[in-house]
Image (tube, helix red, strand yellow):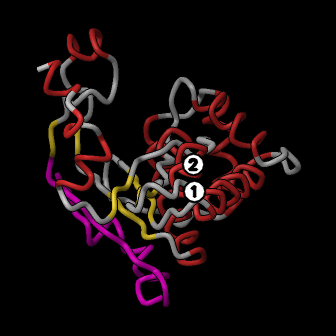
Amino acid sequence: MAQRVAAEDFRPRALFDSFGIEVLATTDDPLDSLEAHRRLAEDVNFSGRVLPTFRPDRYTKFGPDFASAVGALVDSAGGGIEGYRGYIEALESRRRHFIDHGAVSTDHGAHTPMTLKLDEAEAARLYQKGLDGTATAQEAHAFEGHMMYQMARMSSEDGLVMTLHPGVHRSIHSPTLKRFGPDTGHDIPFAVDYVTGLKPVLDDFGTAEGFHLSLIHI
């Protein structure tokens, strides 16, 4: 196996050509510099397209590292505006960074396809509870739904295709989670109601010019 992987015809660029790949999209953290993408795009010896994809889950779901992740996100945008409004503007800024590096889509691993259109005061209240680590499970779910609405709003403005893949119980096997950590494949799908959950987004952006929504249920 090691010999096969080391063979010249098994190197990434050789495989890119042998499989006839036209476009390859990676999944990237919003704070990624995308320097590797820049270098690849400028490489005259490589004619393929490798595009970054904006994956903001870490910054839209409450969890143990939400406060530190969001702090770094806001700092990346200059930290000029505090609170929820600064958080939103930082996400918009990072999306522009991705577009500048060739991105055409976003990727969202929501638990359910629920979307909520909260007023700014309520969104700010939930955001602060997320930072403080005092949000209930219901409040965390509501904030995630609101941020899915905000991601749709941003996509309607900047043109990034919004890819949503809900309906998965993640890290379901505790021993495997403990041994290998999160996002290592021990996930189980469950049924979801797309129509009801996406109604706020479809009402406001469903016919908006330039808005594209891709739904995936694994």
Q: Is residue 217 above or below residue 33?
A: below
Image point (50%, 70%), residue name: 160
**Mark 2: which secondary structure?**
helix
Q: Position of residue 53 (x, y in %)?
A: 45, 55
Label 1 neighbour load within 10 Å: few <14, some 14-19, many 20+:
few
Image point (31%, 52%), residue name: 112
**Side of 44 relative to 95 (left or right):** left
Front in this rendered view, residue 113 or 96? 96
Q: Quadrant of residue 165?
A: bottom left
Q: Which mark is residue 39?
A: 2
Magenta segment: 190-218
**Side of 168 relative to 197 (left or right):** left
Q: Quadrant of residue 174?
A: top left
Is residue 17 one of those drawn in magenta?
Answer: no
Three-letter amino acid code of the residue under disc 1: Glu
Q: Is residue 46 above or below residue 35?
A: below
**Side of 118 relative to 110 (left or right):** right
Is residue 212 one of those drawn in magenta?
Answer: yes
Q: Which residue is identified by label 1?
A: 42
Q: Which mark is residue 27?
A: none
From the image, which quarter does the N terminus lie in? top left
Q: How many marks?
A: 2
Q: Position of residue 217 (x, y in %)?
A: 19, 56
Q: Are marks 2 and 1 in contact (CB under 8 Å)?
A: yes
Image point (46%, 80%), residue name: 211
Three-letter amino acid code of the residue under disc 2: Arg
